[in-house]
């Protein structure tokens, strides 16, 4: 049977390095040998999110335009959205290299379970982060450090993904907001603030709101001071 191979990587870096793409190619190559498929064309989308409908992607649309069955390495390379999967099942034929024998109902069920698990993971992550932030605001040094590590990891990830101009604008706005309170923070420290909580209390007492209009917390102060390159007095 003749088939079309379709590959997708979410980041440009993955596409340039070949990592991810090579793994997908290997999955499909093995499945093709085992199932007697002949790959007659290949299409690859680079830097495309799984949240975009396959038929709205440049190479994804071309893959399905052949009119032949489309093979993907894993179901999430086609889409992470159950509605996308269900819609494609009605108009096109596709197969998954890691589940070559799966029928339409099985693929649909797998997509639903995968989406449910992602939802659970997201909810657990949000709950854990909320708890961590509460501990940090209460003065838990370990929690503050974990939040700092997370912020640094996220910053590194954003750099690696080469965020778009819109994200650059957001960072500039954050820098500008931080610059507005720089003098006040330095004055608070100069007047004797020796902890993040004391700096937060100082800013709040002066009627200066956070970027979101709320009151200052140790975590918020820590982030702004890091952005400004400010430190509390040594030994504090």
Image: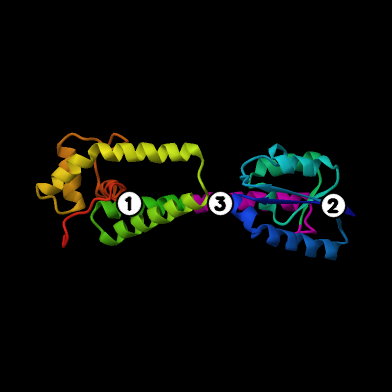
Q: Which mark is residue 3?
A: 2
Query: Label 3, on which residue?
Result: 118
Q: Is residue 132 left or right of residue 183?
A: right
User: Which badge, 1 or 2, is on the more N-terminal residue?
Assistant: 2
Q: Position of residue 210 (x, y in %)?
A: 27, 38
113 inside magenta stretch: yes
Q: Residue at x 18, y 47 (%)?
A: 199
> From this viewpoint, is residue 82 visible?
yes
Q: Cα distance, mark 2 to mark 3?
A: 30 Å
Q: Quadrant of the N terminus?
A: bottom right
Quadrant in the rendering for residue 168: top left
What is the image's colouring? rainbow
Q: Position of residue 27 (x, y in %)?
A: 74, 62
Q: Are marks 3 and 1 in contact (CB under 8 Å)?
A: no
Q: Is residue 156 left or right of residue 147?
A: right
Q: Are marks 1 and 2 in contact (CB under 8 Å)?
A: no
Front residue of this view, candidates 140 and 52: 52
Q: Quadrant of the C terminus?
A: bottom left
Q: Position of residue 92 (x, y in %)?
A: 80, 42
Q: Assign a secondary structure to mark 2.
A: strand
- How crowded is the residue under tag 3: few (<14 C-alpha within 10 Å), some, or many (20+)? few
Q: Assign a secondary structure to mark 1.
A: helix
Q: Nearer the viewer, mark 2 or mark 3?
A: 2
In this rendering, is residue 12 above or below 235? Answer: above
> From this viewpoint, is residue 11 visible?
no
User: Which badge, 3 or 1, is on the more N-terminal residue?
Assistant: 3
User: Which badge, 2 or 3, is on the more N-terminal residue?
Assistant: 2
- How crowded is the residue under tag 1: few (<14 C-alpha within 10 Å), some, or many (20+)? many
Q: Which residues are magenta?
A: 97-122
Q: Cα distance, mark 1 to mark 2?
A: 50 Å
Q: Which mark is residue 133?
A: 1
């Amino acid at each position: 049977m003749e088939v079309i191979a379709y590959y997708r990587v979410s980041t440009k870096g993955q596409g340039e390095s070949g990592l991810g793409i090579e793994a997908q190619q290997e999955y499909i190559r093995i499945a093709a040998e085992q199932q007697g498929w002949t790959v007659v064309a290949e299409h690859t989308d680079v830097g495309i999110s799984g949240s975009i409908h396959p038929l709205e992607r440049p190479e994804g649309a071309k893959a399905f335009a052949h009119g032949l069955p489309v093979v993907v390495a894993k179901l999430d390379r086609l889409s992470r959205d159950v509605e996308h999967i269900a819609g494609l099942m009605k108009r096109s034929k596709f197969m998954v290299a890691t589940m070559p024998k799966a029928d339409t109902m099985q693929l649909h069920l797998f997509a639903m379970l995968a989406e449910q698990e992602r939802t659970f993971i997201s909810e657990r992550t949000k709950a854990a982060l909320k708890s961590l932030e509460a501990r940090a605001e209460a003065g838990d040094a370990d929690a503050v450090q974990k939040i700092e590590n997370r912020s640094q990891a996220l910053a590194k990830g954003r750099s690696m993904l080469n965020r778009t101009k819109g994200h650059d604008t957001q960072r500039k706005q954050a820098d500008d907001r931080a610059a507005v309170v720089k003098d006040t923070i330095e004055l608070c420290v100069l007047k004797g603030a020796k902890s993040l909580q004391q700096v937060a209390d100082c800013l709040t007492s002066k009627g200066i709101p956070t970027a979101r209009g709320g009151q200052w917390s140790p975590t918020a102060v820590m982030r702004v001071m890091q952005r400004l390159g400010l430190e509390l007095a040594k030994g504090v």
